[in-house]
């Protein structure tokens, strides 16, 4: 998890996954019905890395932005928590050639 663990907005987390780029994770989660984003919302349309992520020392290619909103449910969070480890494990095994 990137950013301050306490001084933050409660509905948003930016995290990175060691050894796996964000794009394949996004695609894998999408196949599981889970929507997340990569990078920073303030530069979501830009091709350049976000100045915010750069200032935080975050590798934009490996950052995922997860947020919940007024229509999100506990089941949505559970779906992410259930799908993310499986997607990451599968991607790491592909990278390792297994």
Image: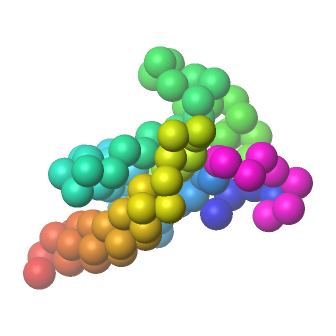
> Is residue 88 shown to the viewer in this render?
no
Q: Position of residue 30 (x, y in %)?
A: 26, 47
Image quarter (top left, top right, bottom left or bottom right) of the C terminus: bottom left
Q: Is residue 6 left or right of residue 13?
A: right
Q: Is residue 53 above or below residue 83?
A: above
Q: Position of residue 25 (x, y in %)?
A: 32, 55
Find the magenta span and give its range.
5-12
Q: Say which quarter of the image contains residue 7.
A: bottom right
Residue displayed at 81% across by 50% down: 8
* In the image, residue 85 lies in the stretch drawn in magenta: no
In front of the other: 79 or 54: 79
Image quarter (top left, top right, bottom left or bottom right) of the N terminus: bottom right
Residue located farthest toward the bottom when viewing the structure as drawn: 98
Q: Position of residue 15 (x, y in %)?
A: 57, 58
Residue located farthest toward the right when viewing the structure as drawn: 7
In front of the other: 68 or 30: 68
Q: Position of residue 49 (x, y in %)?
A: 56, 31
Residue located farthest toward the left when viewing the structure as drawn: 98
Q: Is residue 78 above or below residue 8?
A: below
In front of the other: 11 or 26: 11
Residue displayed at 19% across by 51% down: 31
Q: Say which quarter of the image contains residue 84.
A: bottom left
Residue displayed at 59% across by 39% down: 70
């Amino acid at each position: 998890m990137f950013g301050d663990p306490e001084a933050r907005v409660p509905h948003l987390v930016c995290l990175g996954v060691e050894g796996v780029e964000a794009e394949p994770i996004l695609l894998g989660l999408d196949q599981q019905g889970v929507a997340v984003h990569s990078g920073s919302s303030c530069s979501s349309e830009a091709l350049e890395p976000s100045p915010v992520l750069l200032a935080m020392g975050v590798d934009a290619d490996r950052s995922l932005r997860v947020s919940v909103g007024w229509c999100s449910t506990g089941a949505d969070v559970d779906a992410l928590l259930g799908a993310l480890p499986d997607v990451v494990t599968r991607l790491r095994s592909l990278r390792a050639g297994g």
